[in-house]
Each structure stands twice: as C-alpha cells, then as structure tokens.
Image (cartoon, rainbow, N blue to C red):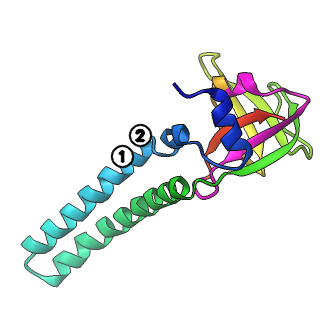
Amino acid sequence: MIEQAEVELANRHGRLHPSQRGKLLDLNFWVAAVLVVAGLVVAVLLAAVAETAAEVLGTLVPILAITAWFAFVCRRRLADVRSGQLVATTGWTHDFGRQRPEGDYPIALSTRLSQGYNEHFYLKAGGRTYPLERKLRERIRPEQVNTVLIAPRSKLLINVLPA
C-alpha cells in the first residue's frame, strides 16, 4: 500500500509518483490510443481497396488528420509520464465560494451548482481553470498558502498540497 507521505514527498520535489501515473493514463488516454490504432488500420484497409487516387485522398486525409490529433494527445500524456516532472504553483489560496474568481490570486477556488444542485469544485491556477475532485478539495486549506502540481504538457491537475 502506498502511503500519502511518500506521494507528497515525491510531489514536493517536483516529481510524479508512480502511483499517480493513472491520472495521466486515464480512460481518455486509452480511448485516444485505441482510436489511433483503429484510424491506422482503417487507413491501410481503405488504401488497399481503393481503386483511384481520388478515392484514397478523399477518405484518407480526414481519417489521418483525426488520427494524428489523437496521436498527439497520447504522445503528450506519455511524455509527461516518462519525464515525471510536475510544475508547481505555490501561493495564497482564496476561496470565492459560489462567486466567479476575481482579482490576482495565485490560486483561486470556486464552487458551481449544476441543474440538480450538485456542487462542482474548480481551482484556478496559472490562468487556467481545472475541475477539482472532492478528495483534493478537502485537502486544500483556503485562505492559506497551498501548492498546486500540474503535468506540464497535458495540463492536468495532479495534486494539491497544503504548504
């Protein structure tokens, strides 16, 4: 069993802990990887059965463009996992509650209600807004200094540490 202290120590040194790889290689990554493989298979099959160059270009160009986009997304996630580096943003954290974040805070928290009146938490750091899991939201100390750890290429929120 992995201890939280071990994960926090790796994160405080700007490193991705091996147990956190699942945050980068999540369902979105695997769906994109399957679509890359499927796109390549379809492209090869279409090129093999097409009779004219116009048929090949008309169908392959869009398929290969979409496949290239998914391959780009997968490559960014894999590069984050391989490098293991995290970008840390440390600063005063202000909780705006249900108001929109305003002002010049390094880290801002906000809460939005869905139509079913379910609360959704968001964290704004470095000019970008991230959805915040309830587990991470409970770890943040509002009106104090916190550290937010983000994967540099894929721009995913990995962890939040009270400073």
Q: x%, y% of residue 72?
A: 45, 63
Looking at the image, residue 140 sits to the left or right of residue 130; the answer is right
* Disc 1 packing (10 Å; few <14; some 14–19; many ≥20): few
Amino acid at dot 1: Val
User: Residue at left 45%, top 61%?
Assistant: 75
Q: CA distance from mark 2 to mark 1?
A: 6 Å
| Residue 15 is at least partly visible in this image | yes
Say which quarter of the image contains residue 147: top right
Amino acid at dot 2: Leu
For the residue pair 84 and 23, the one nearer the viewer reads as 84
Q: Is residue 10 above or below residue 34?
A: above
Is 152 in the magenta?
Answer: yes
Q: Which residues are magenta?
A: 136-154
For the residue pair 46 and 52, the one nearer the viewer reads as 46
Looking at the image, residue 8 sits to the left or right of residue 162; the answer is left
* Disc 2 packing (10 Å; few <14; some 14–19; many ≥20): few
| Quadrant in which the C terminus appears | top right
Asked if the residue under mark 1 is in contact with the one under mark 2, i.e. CB atoms within 8 Å, the reply is yes
For the residue pair 26 and 69, the one nearer the viewer reads as 26
User: Residue at left 31%, top 69%?
Assistant: 64
Residue 31: mark: 1
User: Residue at left 69%, top 42%?
Assistant: 11
What residue is pinned by disc 2?
27
Is 28 in the magenta?
Answer: no
User: Residue at left 64%, top 23%?
Assistant: 135
